[in-house]
Image: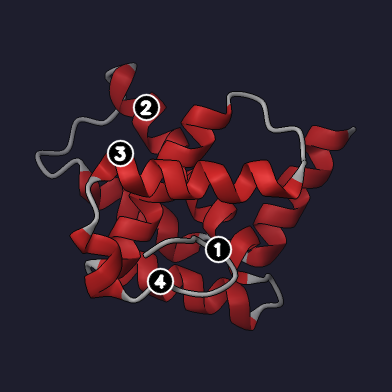
Amino acid sequence: MKKYDPMAAPPPADWLELDEADQIALVAAYHKSTRVEIPRPEVHAMVHVVVENQLAEGIEPAQDALERLMADGLDRHDAIHAISNVLLDHMQRIARGEVTEPDQHEQYFDDLKSLTADKWLRMIDEEED
């Protein structure tokens, strides 16, 4: 793979064949090419990579969330951002010791199941206010 485009799913085998540094570099290069200012672009790229890896590995709750969000009108890139937001929130809760289930993924998967395009868009609107 020489380029990354969040609007098109990378072929899973090709994506997973790359090492993480190359995945991050491809995602960062894409975002740099858009000339959109992104706070903490390295973190942004890393989270994109985690979500793309979940999708490429066939993690069902992530795949279902992506499909549902796109069916509700989000483009693939925005759907990845919505999933990323749930992931980051979950990671923050783990860091604060708020996730106590033996399987720490369970709450993340539950949160993905309840994620809707409407929830994501409302959150974006609140951030802009």
Which quadrant, please, contains the N terminus? bottom left
Q: Secondary structure at mark 1?
A: loop
84 or 93: nearer the eye? 84
Query: Alpha-carbon distance for marks 1 and 4?
Result: 8 Å
Mark 1 or mark 2, earlier in chain: 1
Foreground of the two, 49 or 127 = 49
Three-letter code for the amino acid on which mark 4 is drawn: Pro
Q: Amino acid at mark 3?
A: Ala
Which of the 4 quarters of the picture holds residue 16?
bottom left
Type of amino acid at the residue the image marks with label 1: Pro
Residue at the disc numbered 1 = 6
**Relative to residue 2, is residue 82 drawn left or right?**
right
Q: Residue at x 49, y 70 (%)?
A: 66
Q: Earlier in the sequence, mark 4 or mark 3?
A: 4
Residue annotated with mark 3: 21
Instruction: For marks 4 and 2, give the one nearer the viewer.
Output: 4
Which is more N-terminal, label 2 or label 4? 4
The residue tagged 2 is 93
- Tag nearer the camera, 2 or 3: 3
Question: Is disc 1 in contact with disc 4, using a CB cutoff of under 8 Å?
Answer: no
SS for tag 4? Answer: loop
